[in-house]
Amino acid sequence: MTAAEAEAFERCIAGGGVALFPADTVYGLAADPSSAAAVDRLYRLKGRGRDRPAAVMFFALEPALAALPELEPRTRAAVERLLPGALTLILPNPERRFPLACGPAPERLGLRVPSLKGALAPLAGVSVPVLQSSANPSGGADARRAGEVDEGIRAGVDLLLDGGELPGTPSTVVDLGDYEFGAWQVMREGAVPSAELEAVL
C-alpha cells in the first residue's frame, strides 16, 4: 500500500463510490455511511438484505470516539482498551448516528477501528469513516487475497486496493450494549480469542 492509494481510497469514498480494500482481517467493501446511493450499491454487490446491519469503520481511534460523544464512561474506557484491533464492537447508539449502517436497530452501532501496520499502514491516515462489510457475497467465504474476491464484486467496485495476503479470519464481534452494567457477550468468534477479551474486560 502507498500514501497515493490511501488518498485514492478517500477520494473514492468522498465521491460516492464503493471500494474494495484490505483491512487487518479480510478484504472488505467500503462506502460513505451517509450516502444512501453508495450504501445501496454496496449491499447490492454483496446480495445482502438491507435489514442486516453493517459496521462503521474509522481508521484511527480518536475520530471514532469523537463521533460518539455520548458513550458512557465505562463503555468508552472499554473501547479505548480494545481498539484498534480485529474487533467489531456493538455499542449503544442513543443518538441514532450512522442510521444506514444500523439496519432495523438504529439504537445500536457496530464500530470497527482496524490495526493497520506494516504494508497496510498508509490506510491509517484515511480521515473519513466508511460503512464497511466483508467483500464476499452474503453468506460466502471471506477473502484473504484480492484475487479470491468474487469476480462480480471485483467488477462492480470503483476502486480495488490490493494489500496482499491478509490473516483471513474475520473480526470478533462483541456486544458492549450493556457494558455500563458489566455485561458483554461475544456474538461471533473471530480473530481475537474470547480469553483475550476476558483479560481486558
Image (cartoon, helix red, strand yellow):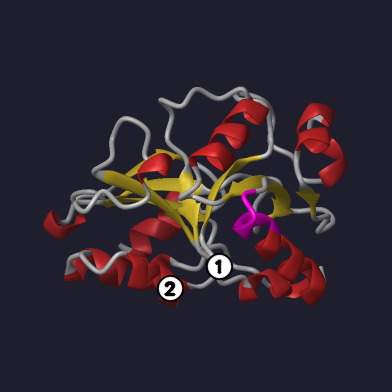
Task: Indicate yes or no whether the magenta region holds residue 15.
Answer: yes
Q: Are marks 2 and 1 in contact (CB under 8 Å)?
A: yes
Query: Residue at image x 72%, y 53%?
Result: 21
Task: Indicate yes or no whether the magenta region holds residue 177.
Answer: no
The spot of residue 110 in percent (x, y) is: 40, 48
- Label 1, residues with CA under 10 Å away: few <14, some 14-19, many ≥20: many
Q: Which of the pair 37/94 is nearer the observer? A: 37
Question: 55 above or below 1?
Answer: above
Query: Residue at image x 75%, y 53%?
Result: 166
Q: Which of the pair 137/87 is nearer the observer? A: 137
Question: 177 above or below 43?
Answer: below
The image's mark for residue 63 is: 2
The prevailing secondary structure element of the residues shown in magenta is: helix
Region of the chain picked out in magenta, as a range: 12-16
Distance from the alpha carbon under mark 2 to that under mark 1: 8 Å
Q: Which residue is mark 1?
A: 59
Q: Is residue 167 visible?
A: no
Query: Residue at image x 28%, y 44%?
Result: 108
Q: Is residue 38 visible?
A: yes
Question: 9 above or below 137?
Answer: below
Q: Secondary structure at mark 2?
A: helix
